[in-house]
Amino acid sequence: MNVLEAIGSRVIHDLSYVGGLTIQFWSGLRSSPRVLPFTGRRGRWLAAMNQMAAIGVDAIPIVGIMSVCAGFILAMQIGSELKRWGALQYVMDTVAIGFTRELGPLLTALVVSGRSGSAFSAEIGTMEVTSEIDALRTMAIDPIEFVMTPKYVAAMIVIPCLTILSNAFGILAGAGFMYMTTKIRLSMYLHYIYNSIDLQDVLSGMLKSLVFATIIVNVGCMEGFRTRGGADAVGRSATSAVVRSTFMVILADAFFTAIFYLVHKY
Amino acid sequence: MISVTDLTVTYEGRRVLDGVSLDIEPGEVMVLLGGSGSGKTTMLRHIIGLERPTAGTVRVRGVDINACSRKELEGIRRTMGVAFQECALFNSMSIEENVSLPLHELTTLADPVIDIMTYMKLASVGLGEAGRLMPPELSGGMKKRAAVARATALDPEILVFDEPSAGLDPIVAAGLDDLILLLKRAFHMTILVVTHELASAFRIADRMAMLYQGSLIAVDNKDSFRASTNPHIRQFLDRVPEPIGQSVAVHNRFQELAGMAGAKK
């Protein structure tokens, strides 16, 4: 196989992967109303609630710890530079804007990708190798609606909530740093933060978190549905789910940040 | 009821099924026999619509399942029950949740009615008191029976079994044979059983078909089958082992490994 053939083969493979993701995403989106309470099928909303607990509630401690650490690190790194220019108060702006626009959604997505993306893939991959997915198909039950959509609906609700929590934890860590270095009290710090961030900053972060949720659920489930073989294949799928979803989250982040930058500029 | 015509399946250039044709009549038990790798499970997966063939058609109740709409296929699947070789019970659900799943998903019956129907299905396979157990808590035979209860939950017209006796002791396997015969008698179901267990096959079959290296070499009633003089059927029935190391491929590979002249690369 020459270089051109290798590149062509890789491009076809990647395009078919993206095509598969798009079809799966569309199927998941179309079946979402059947998961919602009152309008949905019985049992689906309960499944979505269980997923909300697994994806969201169980991730609060790790998201909280990571956000506090990241907020404190960011404040210290920026503070050490700004202190030389006597502009330490700008640490507050940087932490607030940095978290609401960027770090909150990204950190949350990375945590959820590592915890839940791999879990989705392992769960569905195991169902695939034990013929449970085939059993669903033979019972005329759509595996995407039954297995993926409750996860998708749950992620679309809890990942933005986790992102808000991450923003709060990161900004509070900044408050801790400012209190230790300049004795600024929390109320004054929060007042400053309130004036320094726009609604647009928060909304852009929320939009990113919805996109990240879509990527994590779709890639995790896709890797699960593509699992063939035995236990080792399930492990490979879980690893692949984390690697691919993390990569796609970063790509999407770069894309959306560029879009928001251009929108702000003009 | 089921009509397979010239079914051909090729995987990566290898022909797994080669123009197989088979008709299964309503109300009969058809046993599909064949050694490991003969294409039995591949044929079953095509009959239940899990795979698309390279060529040929599979008609269930007159509908070509590879050319029909998704709605039609779902309608056909609702009239079929499938008990997989690995049972395919949902490990995160109890046995009664497994059995009631199709009733919850595909009917508008009230929950108390579903509870009664679930208990009836479980009781009919002797698992009336095991409904609360989880699949890992069941023995192999109990799992198979639970899979049958789930497959019959919607009272299907067609029931498909993939290796029902595999991995079971003779007593449990005989119990499963009785269950299959009971389902046929009581509900007049059309039953397709894929197996290589001869004792079980001769006990339950109305007719038998045999696959050999992807081709259907016989379709007959069990008495004619037992008296067959076809060498491949005789080898299977008389349990004559395949001579190891006599195939051309094995011979060539040995020569290749030994670095002998004339080995084919």
Image (cartoon, rainbow, N blue to C red):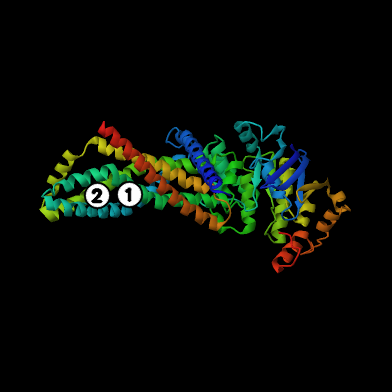
**Residue A12 point in image, percent of width and height:** 53, 42
What residue does disc 1 label? A107
Q: Are marks 2 and 1 in contact (CB under 8 Å)?
A: yes
Which quadrant of the figure contains the C terminus of chain A?
A: top left
Amino acid tagged 1: Leu
Which circle marks residue B84 in the picture?
A: none
**In front here: B150 or B247?**
B247
The answer for which chain carries disc 2 is A
Q: Which residue is drawn at the image coordinates 53% and 36% (left, top)? A: B110
**In front here: B76 or A111?**
A111
How many neighbours does mark 2 have within 10 angstroms: few (below 14), some (14-19), or many (20 or more)? Answer: many
What residue does disc 2 label? A170
**Residue A119 point in image, percent of width and height:** 45, 52
Q: Which residue is drawn at the image coordinates 30% and 36% (left, top)? A: A260
**In front here: A30 or A4?**
A4
Amino acid tagged 2: Gly
How many neighbours does mark 1 have within 10 angstroms: few (below 14), some (14-19), or many (20 or more)? Answer: many
Q: In which image quadrant can residue B4 be found?
A: top right
**Residue A126 point in image, percent of width and height:** 53, 52
Label 1, secondary structure: give it.
helix
Above or below, comparing residue B170 to residue A197 in the picture = below
**In front here: B117 or B45?**
B45
Q: Which residue is drawn at the image coordinates 86% and 50% (left, top)? A: B223
**Between marks 2 and 1, how big is the CA–CA gap?**
10 Å
In the image: residue A221, left or right of residue A106: right
